[in-house]
Image: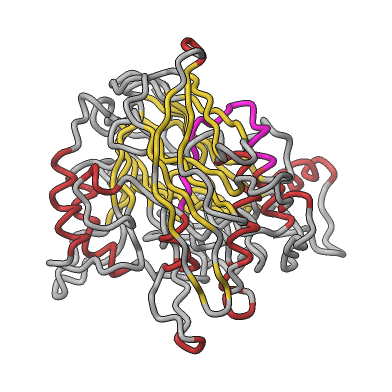
Amino acid sequence: MGISQGLSIPSFLLPLALVLNLVFVCNGGTTSAFVRNVQKGVNMSLDSDVFAVPSGYNAPQQVHITQGDLVGKAVIVSWVTEDEPGSNAVRYWSTANNKQKKLAKGKIVTYRFFNYSSGFIHHTTVRNLEYNTKYYYEVGLGNTTRQFWFITPSEIGPDVPYTFGLIGDLGQSFDSNRTLFHYELNPKKGQTVLFVGDLSYSDNFPNHDNVRWDTWGRFVERSAAYQPWIWTVGNHEMDFAPEIGETKPFKPYSHRYHTPYKASQSTSPFWYSIKRASAHIIVLASYSAYGKYTPQYQWLEQELPKVNRTETPWLIVLMHSPWYNSNNQHYMEGETMRVMYEPWFVRYKVDVVYAGHVHAYERTERVSNIAYNVVNGICTPIKDQSAPVYITIGDGGNLGGTETNTTEPQPEYSAFREASFGHAIFDIMNRTHAHYSWHRNQDGYSVEADSHWFFNRFWHPVDDSTTHVFH
């Protein structure tokens, strides 16, 4: 509540009033009162420098990498050529052995969407890499060759430190550019981006203008060509448009962005798992069938018991539609998936769940709502130290602006929420501790607008709630 005009406040109470005016303390945690521009964003124009096509005949563009196997010893390198297919090979070498250059060959795909024809989309998997090694790689062999690099993770182990970046619902607005720039300059230096869905927002343009898939690919190349982005599919990747004859969901996305789903025995690229350093990461698909007997259900049922917490202590789940969200936008859209899978998350002690979809930021306490059985009426979320923390990070910079219409009073399960754009960092220290921080775009690069120490649910399952005194 602000200070009303005409209200007399004793001078000795004024500093306290100003402090209290910074946040609203509700039934739950904190609703930040930080004020940012709430107007709708503006997309960057097609001639923006971040969308520039690289010079040279048939120059590779939209270069990006993702993990290419289960354990982090492979990468999938993807790029697009426009003039002709050109070579599908990747030439690569390590800094320790730069005289022995190797070749990996891949596949080329194309697609049509309404009146758009794609370029030649290349996907090549580079395998049998050494852990903790810097590799250089080249694409566009025989025409205009471009060179990039990446660093493989350390060998999987329980105390391997690793730093993940978190971005969601990025789009290609001026705010999107600020988010990516802010992430790139964060001194914590994320090593891999966990992306929670909604990439280009091309479906917001007339006829789902797929040129905006190309511009987005060139926009994120400055990061995605140098460190893996782990992909989660969102609703804006569906591109289901029967009014223009496009009835195959996810067509542009599935041609452009590949995942190593077969390595985890998944039958779909939209749900899969990877191991990286000391983390086991499960990616789920909010917009594919997930009910009992469906392929995604059966896969997750078999996947969770495979997680070896003595090898990968940190169990992280990515999805697009949040299960716990106190924003009226998209409120309870993830409820049916929550009902299906939440008991498993509690049983297997998932550490943290990241989602997007809501264009604002929120972090919950550890809560569960698994007691309800239709007749008992027990349907209120409760504090549960075996449950995950749920974090909504759909604040990448979408065109619609941040979403400020929150439920009031703030629910008890909500620890912190704010309607601002930004990114997050999940910094794993060892098997017991990880430090999480959220960084709003308006702050300095090292400023933590929200932060939290995570205690691992398997190795150090003590109370790590916001209100608890840490030991």
- Whether residue 25 appears in this view of the structure is no
**Magenta region:** 181-196
x and y percentages locating residue 135 in the rendered image: 49, 23
- Most extreme residue toward the bottom, as rendered? 243
Q: Is residue 190 magenta?
A: yes
- Most extreme residue toward the front, as rendered? 142
Q: Residue at x 61, y 73 (%)?
A: 209
x and y percentages locating residue 322 in the rendered image: 41, 60
Q: Residue at x 85, y 64 (%)?
A: 5
- Side of 439 relative to 260 (left or right): right
Nearer to the camera, 386 or 173: 173
- Side of 310 relative to 169 (left or right): left
Nearer to the camera, 403 or 394: 394
Q: Is residue 34 magenta?
A: no
Location of residue 333 (image quadrant) = bottom left
Q: Residue at x 45, y 15 (%)?
A: 100
Residue 324 higher or lower than 303, as above or below: below
Q: Which quadrant is the N terminus positioned in?
A: bottom right
x and y percentages locating residue 340 in the rendered image: 21, 63
